[in-house]
Image: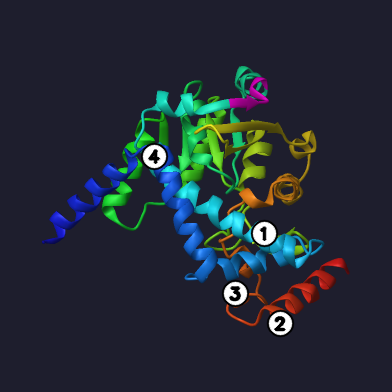
Amino acid sequence: MNKQESKNSLYGLLNFVSRLPLQILRGFARGLAGLVNIFHITKTSKIIRLNLKITLPELSDQQREAITRQAIRNELMSYFEFFSIWGSTNQKNIDRIHHISGEHLLHDALAAKKGVVLIVPHFGTWEVMNAYIAQFTPMTIMYKPVKDESADRFVREARSRENAHLVPTDESGVRQIFKALKQGGTTVILPDHTPNVGGEYIPYFGVPLATSNLSAKLIQKTKAKVLFLHAKRNSNQGFDMSIEPISDAIYDCDANTGTQIILEALKALIQRHPEHYHWSYKRFKAHPKLGRIYDIDENLALEKIDAIRKENLH
């Protein structure tokens, strides 16, 4: 098989998987999660356990272990759900959203015609919300191409159905988002990424981590409305979506304080539903003293975290 045939085969496989019934994909994900939880066949559970010990130290080991197992299952299910969402029509994905809390907040924000910044963390199955939002507003979204060309083509085709304009993750992309907001458009930003370069050191669960303050800058410079969105699956082959306000203080403070307000909203969500957050991301290495935190002994890693937290208090 030559390179082009291999690409076409992968693209065809992704299309095939994306058209399987959602309940089958969820069942496959549950089975895979069971294997991971029983045999620890990936490093993911180790990363999740450390992240939970850092962020939720008040819980018992038994409570965190239960959340770890649930989080592995939920994250794997989300990944398989993404395939189904990307392979489905917008209307089918809209129909999958069974309940929306705070729906009026989005309509009020759009009616203001000042632009809207949607803060969407790595929580639950966020991809399902794009089709719903696309009914009401065009979106300008930063997009980092998938390394595999076939997978990238598959995702881009899905995005094109969702009234989304994809821009690069660089200064030119930021300028395009700024322009779109000034014209009353909408952007979606994930707040819990570590920036590739630079970033401000802003406390996250008491640990200063390199963090992009782009969201707060956009909000403050354009006076766009800001909302906090998330979605999680329900037991009826669908999803429930939540639209929440963020403190009005974000409009009248500096960018770092505004970013802290966003992170506090994320922290509150995690504390309510820790099992639905995607814990596999190595977020806590985004500090000069914590670069190898996920590769060292767990007790030593936690000692380093505690030392940095104490430094941050002074």
Marks 2 and 1, how far apart in space? 23 Å
In the picture, the quarter occupied by the N terminus is bottom left
Residue under numbered circle 1? 66
Pick out the residue farthest to the right: 314
Q: In the structure shown, which secondary structural element does the residue marked by tag 3 occupy? A: loop
Q: In the rendered structure, which segment of residues is drawn in magenta?
A: 99-104
User: Which amino acid, by three-letter code, is at mark 1?
Assistant: Ala
Image spot of residue 264 (x, y percent) = 75, 48
Marks 3 and 2, how far apart in space? 10 Å
Marks 4 and 3, how far apart in space? 32 Å
Pick out the residue farthest to the top: 111
User: Which amino acid, by three-letter code, is at mark 3?
Assistant: Tyr
Could you say which disc has been placed on residue 84 in the image? 4
* Residue plotted at (40% across, 45% down): 25
Residue under numbered circle 3? 294
Marks 1 and 4, how far apart in space? 27 Å
Image spot of residue 284 (x, y percent) = 65, 66
* Residue plotted at (41% across, 35% down): 165
Camera-nearest residue between 273 and 144? 273
